[in-house]
Image: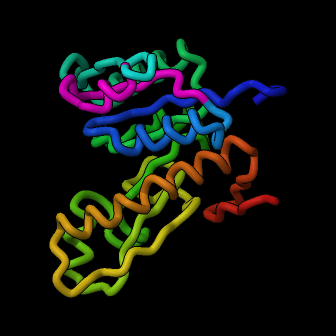
């Protein structure tokens, strides 16, 4: 970002948008020098779009049914982000795997949060995977996105103890409580230029 310009974020959402709200709140509080340039959802009923609209953020419905395949969908998504001069793409509960079209358009500039301590339990239902395996600790991971499933370089992780009587719902709830801080902190590090990628390792700069 040149001078005092704010980093422009493009947020992809599919659900309620609690992580989007956490990002908006920290921006309003002056803790992250960024602005949400637009929010795009592949679902018209995603409450995240309502959250965006309440803050004057362009809320765009972009459904995959209008496209023949994932690559053409991503090509159109990239064009939307280009129109809004997006610099960092945020996957805030976006329930689609990105293709190389999106990854190549924003190299090392797409962030996702996953409700497990990667590389353990990638993919769907990570909380239930953790419970079924019998781990004592779970948590969340913020990582850069590559063309794999939750395989990109790890930026930050937060640990959440697993209780003996946890269900998928209760563990999910407790992980969500730390997701918001972890995700926004990773975005803050990126915006401030305090992230350096060396192969699979993400180093935090002073």
Q: Position of residue 84 (x, y in %)?
A: 54, 16
- Look at 22% across and 28% down and name the residue there: 43
**Residue placed most toward the observer, 130 or 168:** 168
Q: Give the side of residue 123 with respect to residue 150, left or right.
A: left
> Relative to residue 200, is residue 160 depicted above or below?
below
- Look at 39% across and 25% down and name the residue there: 52
Q: Give the side of residue 137 with respect to residue 24, left or right.
A: left
- Look at 32% across and 69% down and name the residue there: 121
Q: Position of residue 28 (x, y in %)?
A: 57, 33
Judged from this view, the residue extending furthest toward the top is 83
Is residue 13 found inside the magenta-colored segment of the image? Answer: no
> Relative to residue 105, is residue 162 depicted above or below?
below
**Residue placed most toward the observer, 104 or 188:** 188
- Look at 59% across and 38% down and name the residue there: 29
Among the 4 quarters of the image, the one containing residue 86: top right
Find the magenta span and give its range.
35-53
> From the image, which quarter does the C terminus lie in?
bottom right
Among the 4 quarters of the image, the one containing residue 97: top left
**Which of the colour schemes (rainbow, by chain, secondary structure, one colour) is used?**
rainbow
> Relative to residue 70, is residue 138 depicted above or below?
below
> From the image, which quarter does the N terminus lie in?
top right
Is residue 40 found inside the magenta-colored segment of the image? Answer: yes
Count of numbered labels shown in the rendering: 0
Q: Position of residue 112 (x, y in %)?
A: 45, 49
Q: Position of residue 47 (x, y in %)?
A: 25, 31
């Amino acid at each position: 970002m040149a001078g005092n310009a704010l980093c422009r974020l493009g947020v992809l959402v599919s659900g309620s948008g609690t992580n989007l709200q956490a990002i908006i709140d920290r921006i309003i509080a002056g803790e992250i020098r960024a602005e949400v340039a637009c929010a795009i959802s592949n679902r018209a009923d995603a409450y995240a779009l309502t959250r965006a609209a309440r803050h004057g953020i362009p809320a765009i419905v972009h459904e995959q049914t209008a496209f023949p395949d994932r690559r053409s969908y991503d090509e159109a998504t990239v064009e939307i982000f280009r129109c809004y001069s997006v610099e960092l793409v945020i996957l805030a509960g976006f329930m689609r795997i990105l293709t190389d079209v999106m990854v190549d358009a924003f190299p090392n500039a797409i962030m996702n949060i996953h409700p497990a301590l990667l590389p353990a339990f990638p993919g769907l239902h990570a909380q239930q995977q953790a419970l079924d395996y019998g781990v004592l600790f779970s948590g969340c991971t913020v990582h850069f996105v590559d063309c794999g499933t939750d395989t990109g370089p790890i930026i930050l992780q937060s640990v959440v103890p697993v209780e003996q009587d946890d269900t998928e719902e209760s563990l999910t709830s407790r992980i969500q409580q730390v997701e918001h801080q972890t995700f926004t902190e990773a975005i803050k590090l990126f915006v401030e230029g305090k992230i350096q990628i060396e192969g699979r390792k993400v180093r935090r700069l002073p």
